[in-house]
Amino acid sequence: MKVTWSLRDGSKKTADVASGTNMMEAAVANSITGVVGECGGNLSCATCHVVVDPEWASKTGEVGDFEDAMLDATEAERANTSRLSCQIIADDTLDGLKLIVPI
């Protein structure tokens, strides 16, 4: 599946992502500036914060309670469609997913 990240400098990067891969791992593997993933996807940091394009928000799943609390600690201001990218798992329904990297 393809994922496109919109970066803060206005550029975009599109990459193929294997099903089952979380978006934090995909971002790090594709050198996406602004997605660090310090905790390795263990929901103990907020360094993989992304904003899901509104047209895709309903397809990425619900924000869990712990993720919701972690989103309050992001470096960039939280948006209505903010997610921790480690909690978005690639599958065929997300082909074409668009993510915005806010930092």
Image: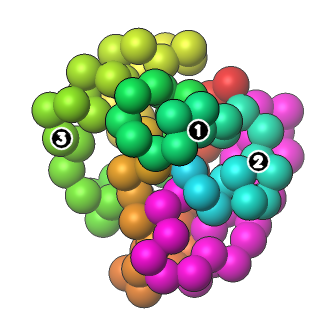
Q: Residue at x 66, y 38 (%)?
A: 35
Residue 41 percent across, percent down from the top left: 46, 45
Q: Amino acid at mark 3?
A: Gly
According to the picture, the residue beneath numbered tag 2 turns out to be 32
Q: Earlier in the sequence, mark 3 or mark 1?
A: 1
Estimate the spatial distance between the alpha carbons at disc 3 and disc 1, rounded to whole Å: 18 Å
Q: Amino acid at mark 1?
A: Gly
Q: Earlier in the sequence, mark 1 or mark 2?
A: 2
Q: Amino acid at mark 2?
A: Ile
User: How packed is label 2: few (under 14 Cα within 10 Å), some, or many (20 or more)?
Assistant: some
Residue 34 percent across, percent down from the top left: 71, 33
Quick check: 39 above or below 18? above
User: How packed is label 3: few (under 14 Cα within 10 Å), some, or many (20 or more)?
Assistant: few
According to the picture, the residue beneath numbered tag 1 turns out to be 37
Circle 3 or circle 1, nearest the eye? 1
Most foreground residue, 82 or 45: 45
Q: Residue at x 33, y 60 (%)?
A: 60
According to the picture, the residue beneath numbered tag 3 turns out to be 64
